[in-house]
Image (cartoon, grey):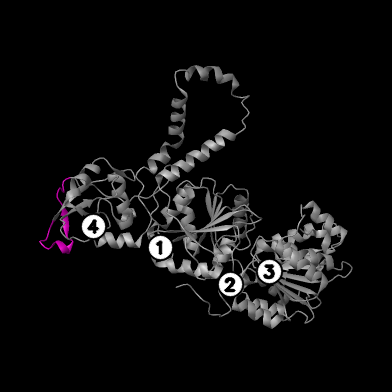
């Protein structure tokens, strides 16, 4: 295994990176650093985020900078303020012992006058977002005609954000003798166009395959009805008690809605989108990095530049319109050599999108069942008591009370104490998931049960006081019936879901079992009422029925699948069909390029 000493880096640079615990180079560093030292070739680097790209180009740039020349010698362009600041901080760390080397970041959302003053004082390496860089050039406040190297970091994301024209304008003002280095997670036609227009016979360096996700990220998908995405996501979060996740939504409004629901349902969550001021965005990111937030809900554009190595899960509440964006999303987890999980929530009509992603990324996606009550409660309990077992507590403050406590607990056995602890700690969770319906969508089961053969069988039709306003679907109603009867062999025929109530059919021989099973069943804290329905018409196929006993009809109110400690229902519906841009420079596509979309 190679070391950084083998690359011919100066003693001052080696001293700095040794303090940063850099010992062995990553694969992309191992390929890029010696290539930049030995040649002046243009380079295309294809690698995921978190693979060490900044050091791959940053160390050679620091090494080759002539601090005696008071001019901009290297320009690094990146898509977001966060990434701009991150790269700047890394370069400052690399050049800690290089006297006189100045790195200046320029980006939107900050005072341009302050940035102009920093450039005037001298800048050897400038790190910039395209919009702010173009603004400085138009004001003639920066000179890049003598630069030696231009780096386009996360070039595909800059193009996705609509910076193609800005990049063309900036690159056209650079000298023809410069070296261009372009780094991207995916290789699109737009990237190839920039390479052909502004690079000379570039050397292509790939870590992994083109458009391939990180090796240590597991890809999982769950299939549910579209209106139950949020309920499914909450169960995924609950079954992973230590989750530290990033949730991706398509639109700003959807991001706000989902974050608001999570907060109301008792989760440590917040939103990151283009409507936030820079101060608000910084505050959210500070809390997320400090792990005060467990879940961060974001749009694709707003999440760009997030540099957090410990994200355990990426949850795709909706898949992006463009398959390549999924590579960026999933690359937010499994960084710095750690394992990660990328979760996709889809409905049945989106199965083809999974096939497209598998083909694009050369990865197999595993389909899993949305976790049920037993699995969630087990994971929550076991995780809690694993921590309880390992905690190192200072008992000094409670020691004076132990004698009295022991006297009070003297009549209780060990098992009694454990039972009472679990009951006090998890009673809400256990009650909450007691009658949780099955959220998994299965086309085959829906079709088979809906069109059940009636050959030789008489069916009894039942009324139940829950409907679509309670987020009930055919699949989830089947789950309620199965849970209530604990007999999955009962055939379920036709199902009709109305807004405030529903109807379902079972063979006449199972009618008594249904009536018995639903005598004392609650759903979302409300007693379920199940009665035999009577025809209002002689034509049974018309599906027009009334309850046999109308006197006990309850006042159905919409309920929601919420955490036990939440207080107020949230009936807001989020959009998952419209895509809007967000960001600080521009979320609009300004390049006019027609893109391949998932339809």
Residue 4 placement (x, y as % from top left):
80, 59
> Residue 153 has which mark?
3
Q: Along the horizontal axis of the image, is 568 left or right of 556?
A: right
User: How many marks do you count on the picture?
Assistant: 4
Q: Along the horizontal axis of the image, is 4 left or right of 339?
A: right
> Residue 347 has which mark?
1
Q: CA distance from mark 3 to mark 2?
A: 13 Å
Q: Residue at 39% across / 57% down in the picture?
A: 228
Q: Which residues are magenta?
A: 535-551
> Residue 160 has which mark?
2
Q: Tell me whether circle 1 and circle 4 mark residues in contact (CB < 8 Å).
A: no
> Residue 493 has which mark?
4
Q: Residue at 53% across / 77% down in the picture?
A: 595
**In the image, which is nearer the foreground, mark 1 or mark 3?**
1
Q: Residue at 45% across / 55% down in the picture?
A: 368
Mark 2 / mark 4, whichever is N-terminal: 2
Is-magenta flag for residue 545?
yes
Q: CA distance from mark 3 to mark 4?
A: 57 Å
Residue 25 seen in the current view: yes
Mark 1 / mark 3, whichever is N-terminal: 3
Q: Secondary structure at mark 2?
A: helix
List the single residue furthest toward the right: 68
Quadrant of the image containing the C terminus: bottom left
Residue 342 placement (x, y as % from top left):
53, 58
Q: Tell me whether circle 1 and circle 3 mark residues in contact (CB < 8 Å).
A: no
Q: CA distance from mark 2 to mark 4?
A: 48 Å
Q: Along the horizontal axis of the image, is 497 left or right of 355?
A: left
Quadrant of the image containing the N terminus: bottom right
């Amino acid at each position: 295994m190679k070391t950084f000493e083998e690359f011919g880096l100066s003693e001052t640079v080696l001293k700095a990176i040794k303090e940063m615990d850099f010992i062995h180079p990553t694969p992309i560093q191992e390929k890029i650093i010696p290539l930049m030292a030995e040649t002046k070739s243009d380079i295309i680097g294809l690698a995921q985020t978190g693979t060490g790209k900044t050091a791959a180009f940053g160390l050679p740039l620091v090494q080759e900078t002539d601090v005696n020349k008071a001019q901009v010698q290297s320009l690094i362009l990146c898509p977001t303020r966060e990434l701009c600041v991150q790269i700047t901080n890394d370069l400052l760390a690399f050049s800690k012992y290089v006297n006189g080397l100045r790195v200046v970041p320029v980006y939107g959302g900050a005072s341009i006058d302050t940035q102009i003053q920093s450039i005037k004082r001298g800048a050897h390496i400038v790190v910039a977002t395209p919009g702010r860089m173009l603004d400085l050039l138009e004001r003639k406040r920066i000179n890049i005609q003598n630069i030696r190297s231009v780096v386009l970091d996360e070039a595909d994301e800059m193009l996705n954000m609509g910076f193609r024209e800005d990049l063309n304008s900036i690159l056209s003002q650079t000298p023809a003798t410069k070296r261009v280095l372009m780094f991207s997670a995916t290789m699109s036609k737009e990237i190839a166009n920039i390479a052909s227009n502004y690079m000379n016979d570039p050397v292509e360096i790939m870590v992994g395959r083109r458009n391939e996700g990180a090796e240590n990220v597991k890809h999982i998908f769950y299939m549910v009805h579209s209106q139950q995405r949020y309920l499914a996501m909450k169960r995924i979060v609950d079954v992973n008690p230590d989750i530290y996740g990033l949730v991706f939504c398509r639109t700003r409004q959807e991001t706000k809605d989902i974050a608001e629901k999570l907060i109301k349902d008792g989760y440590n969550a917040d939103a990151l989108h283009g409507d936030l001021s820079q101060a608000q965005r910084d505050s959210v990111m500070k809390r997320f990095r400090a792990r005060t937030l467990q879940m961060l809900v974001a749009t694709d554009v707003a999440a760009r530049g997030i540099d957090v190595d410990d994200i355990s899960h990426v949850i795709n509440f909706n898949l992006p319109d463009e398959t390549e964006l999924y590579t960026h999303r999933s690359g937010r987890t499994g960084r710095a050599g750690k394992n990660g999980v990328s979760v996709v929530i889809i409905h049945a009509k989106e199965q083809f999108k999974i096939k497209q992603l598998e083909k694009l990324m050369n990865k197999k996606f595993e389909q899993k069942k949305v976790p049920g009550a037993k699995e969630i409660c087990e994971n929550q309990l076991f995780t809690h008591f694993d921590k309880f077992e390992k905690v190192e507590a200072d008992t000094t403050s409670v020691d004076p009370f132990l004698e009295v406590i022991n006297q009070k607990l003297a009549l209780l056995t060990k098992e009694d104490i454990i039972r009472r602890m679990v009951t006090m700690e998890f009673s809400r969770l256990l009650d909450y998931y007691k009658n949780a319906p099955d959220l998994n969508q299965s086309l085959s089961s829906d079709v088979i049960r809906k069109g059940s053969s009636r050959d030789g069988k008489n069916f009894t039709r039942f009324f139940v006081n829950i409907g679509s306003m309670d987020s009930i679907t055919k699949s989830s109603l089947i789950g309620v019936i199965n849970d209530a009867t604990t007999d999955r062999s009962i055939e379920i025929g036709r199902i009709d879901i109305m807004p405030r109530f529903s109807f379902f059919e079972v063979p006449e021989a199972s009618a008594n079992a249904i009536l018995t099973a639903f005598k004392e069943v609650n759903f979302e804290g409300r007693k379920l009422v199940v009665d035999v329905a009577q025809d209002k018409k002689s034509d049974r196929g018309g599906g027009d029925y009334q309850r046999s006993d109308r006197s006990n009809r309850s006042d159905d109110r919409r309920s929601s699948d919420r955490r036990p400690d939440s207080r107020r229902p949230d009936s807001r519906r989020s959009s998952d069909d419209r895509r809007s841009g967000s960001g600080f420079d521009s979320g609009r596509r300004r390049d006019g390029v027609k893109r391949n979309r998932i339809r």
